[in-house]
């Protein structure tokens, strides 16, 4: 079982709306890849919330893990795209997911949980930060902690970043976020040496670094593996590309695939997402293809 903590929300573009949020995108991809997932989240008692429930029910998420807030609205994000499809986010505050009650969810069987996923947006308030910290402190030793740090100014604070780094066994971030960690916590300036320093200083097993069009690298204490960004043609938008990358890394890691296979498949899937409007595809065939590639990579280990 993979436990995913965090926001589910509505991405509002100029011409359309999509259900999104990094934890939802991550959970959705893993679910479509055939992996067992619990998404612990909170929505408002409103039209957006009802749309979300219908989608989650359609894809067989456990609706018992979705809290409904009678006072606060479902989260929304205004997304503006530049001419390269790169988004700028205006994230609404005081929304339902800020009040996620992790003490009120059905108990997690930590003997069965293999991974718990979290980020910093769900920790932007003092109350939520305390909830997430207590939840992660109580996780079983078998469950790896996958942190997609996802720094969206001004929706994070130094304390939550520091705690997230301490909890993480797998850390996914981009170059801007790596630079933020360097400026906040020290370490060498050169990218590869800084990645190695973060691994050692925060006792992280794997660091997942994405660079947009300049590719990506997976780092462990023993080695690093890089993958270029595939050129799949026109980029519609890059919203959710990092979440797609993270999901394939998580799935590949849990299937114990070689790092070079994980990096290549993650880059391929993220590039595919960039060719779509929004962050998650409806077409199951792309997931079926990815599952077959993972099975093939597992067979040649």
Image: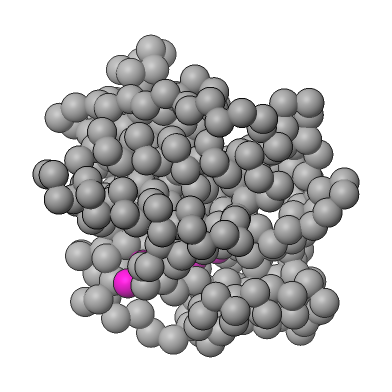
Main SS category, magenta section: strand
* Residue 169 seen by the camera: yes
Q: Is residue 228 left or right of residue 89?
A: left
Q: Is residue 212 left or right of residue 238?
A: left
- Relative to 245, does residue 7 appear above or below in the rendering? below
- Whole-percent x, y for residue 245 in the image: 45, 43
- Whole-percent x, y for residue 255 in the image: 23, 56
Residue placed most toward the observer, 36 or 41:
36
Q: Quadrant of the C terminus?
A: top left
Q: Is residue 251 left or right of residue 56?
A: left
- Whole-percent x, y for residue 278 in the image: 68, 50
Q: Residue at x 70, y 37 (%)?
A: 236
Residue 5 painted magenta: yes
The boundaries of the magenta stretch are 1-6
- Relative to 118, does residue 206 appear above or below in the rendering? above
Q: Residue at x 51, y 40 (%)?
A: 270
Residue placed most toward the observer, 164 or 253:
253
Residue 43 painted magenta: no
Q: Is residue 112 left or right of residue 35?
A: left
Q: Residue at x 78, y 35 (%)?
A: 81
């Amino acid at each position: 079982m993979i436990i995913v903590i965090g926001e589910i929300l509505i991405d509002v573009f100029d011409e359309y709306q999509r259900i999104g949020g990094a934890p939802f995108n991550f959970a959705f991809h893993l679910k479509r890849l055939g992996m067992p997932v619990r998404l612990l989240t909170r929505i408002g008692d409103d039209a957006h919330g009802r749309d979300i429930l219908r989608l989650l029910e359609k894809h067989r998420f456990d609706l018992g893990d979705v809290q409904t807030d009678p006072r606060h609205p479902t989260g929304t994000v205004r997304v503006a795209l530049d001419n390269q499809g790169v988004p700028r986010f205006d994230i609404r505050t005081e929304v339902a997911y800020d009040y996620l009650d992790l003490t009120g969810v059905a108990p997690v069987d930590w003997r069965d949980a293999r991974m718990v996923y979290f980020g910093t947006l769900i920790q932007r308030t003092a109350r939520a930060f305390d909830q997430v910290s207590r939840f992660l402190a109580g996780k079983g030793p078998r469950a790896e902690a996958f942190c997609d740090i996802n720094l969206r100014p001004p929706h994070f604070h130094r304390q939550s970043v520091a705690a997230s780094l301490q909890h993480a066994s797998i850390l996914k971030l981009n170059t801007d976020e790596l630079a933020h960690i360097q400026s906040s916590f020290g370490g060498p300036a050169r990218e590869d040496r800084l990645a190695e320093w973060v691994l050692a200083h925060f006792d992280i097993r794997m660091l997942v670094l994405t660079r947009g069009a300049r590719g990506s690298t997976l780092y462990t204490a023993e080695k690093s593996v890089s993958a270029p960004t595939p050129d799949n043609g026109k980029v519609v938008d890059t919203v959710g590309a990092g979440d797609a990358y993270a999901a394939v890394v998580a799935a590949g890691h849990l299937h114990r695939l070689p790092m070079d296979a994980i990096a290549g498949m993650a880059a391929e899937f993220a590039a595919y997402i960039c060719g779509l409007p929004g962050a998650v595809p409806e077409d199951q065939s792309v997931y079926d293809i990815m599952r077959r590639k993972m099975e093939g990579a597992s067979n040649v280990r």
